[in-house]
Amino acid sequence: MVHVLHITNGESVVEGFRQGSLSGEYLSWIDVLHEGPVPLCSTLEELSRIRGRFIAAIGWDTHERRHATFAERNCTLQSFREHEDVVLWFEHDLFDQLQLIQLLDWFASHEAGSTKLSLIQAGTYLGSLTGVELLALLPSRQEVTTQQLALGHQAWHAFCAPNPSGLSGLAAQDFAALPYLASALRRFLEEYPSTRDGLSRTEQQLLRAAASGHEKREQIYFAAGKSEKAIFMGDSSVYLRLERLADGPAPALERLPRNSYRITNHGRKLLAGEADWIRDRGGIDLWLGGVHLHGADAAWRWDADRKALRAA
């Protein structure tokens, strides 16, 4: 028996575990939940099939390989009672907080038996830590409480709901039990199209970076990230948005050779609030958690001035 199962956000942290010779088995949760459909499903396997199809559709993996990866991941999770301890390692940003509430929701509906479930809530990026630094965090783990399980369940169901009102209500609060959750949810709501220009906050940041003279996609990625208090989006997610901004009947970016982009006149009008990204493209087809925005306009938009979602 491996006494401890460590569950964390990705392979970079797992590599740190190996470097630090952290005792136990490692599980990377390997899903980018702020991308694509995350509807409420009755089982983890059902959601994994939906996630696998989406990831294959955007070209991040083959359907077969992702199906096998998720199946292995889910099998390891479901065997958690074979371990004396399960330690959840998650940091402060949106990427991690969504994974955390998914796992808390799952554990809330599964009896732990004699297995102890604990949590490390890091206010720094775990992937940037050395093995020694990760080992130093282990004593900070605390046993997961019933309050944390209940809050994870509530937040996950709100995230997966087809109407974002519940999530908006949670984002307006702060929770001592999960101190990074509310700010992460507020950042997620800013990915809804703006009432001002139809762009998400990330898309606005990318266009501003391009407007300032950055052309290579790596430069745009790093420049846009400087506007984030807690960076949650990897380069693949950013490159997906750059391609989206360069598509359609009225592109905001012009593609250049060698993975580079230049802002268009339409992109400058968007930044000036003189155009609307959704209406100029003829509509929207976008998933944000369990919410599917589709049609001639978005059913929900983010009002940055009021810091609130508004229904169309």
Image: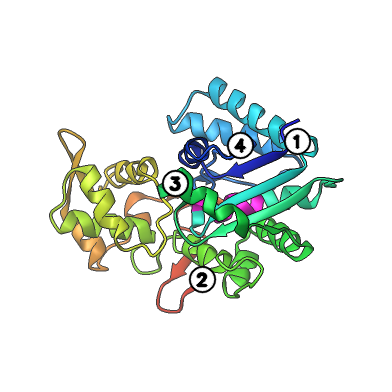
Which marked residue is nearer to the observer: mark 4 or mark 1? 4
Instruction: Say which residue label 2 marks.
Output: 310
Residue 30 seen in this snapshot: yes
Residue at 62% of width from left, 67% of height from top? Answer: 165
Q: Is residue 101 magenta?
A: yes
**Residue 27, numbered circle:** 4
Question: How far is disc 3 from disc 2 in space, using C-alphas?
Answer: 36 Å
Amino acid on which the number 4 mark rests in the picture? Leu
| Quadrant of the image occupied by residue 4 | top right
- Which quadrant: the N terminus? top right
The tag earlier along the polypeptide, 4 or 2, is: 4
184 vs 277, left or right, is right
Instruction: Say which residue label 1 marks.
Output: 78
State whether the magenta stretch is mostly helix, strand or loop. helix
Q: Which residue lies furthest to the top in this view?
A: 64
Question: How far is disc 4 from disc 2 in space, using C-alphas?
Answer: 39 Å
Q: Where is residue 49 in the image (x, y as percent from the top left)?
A: 64, 32
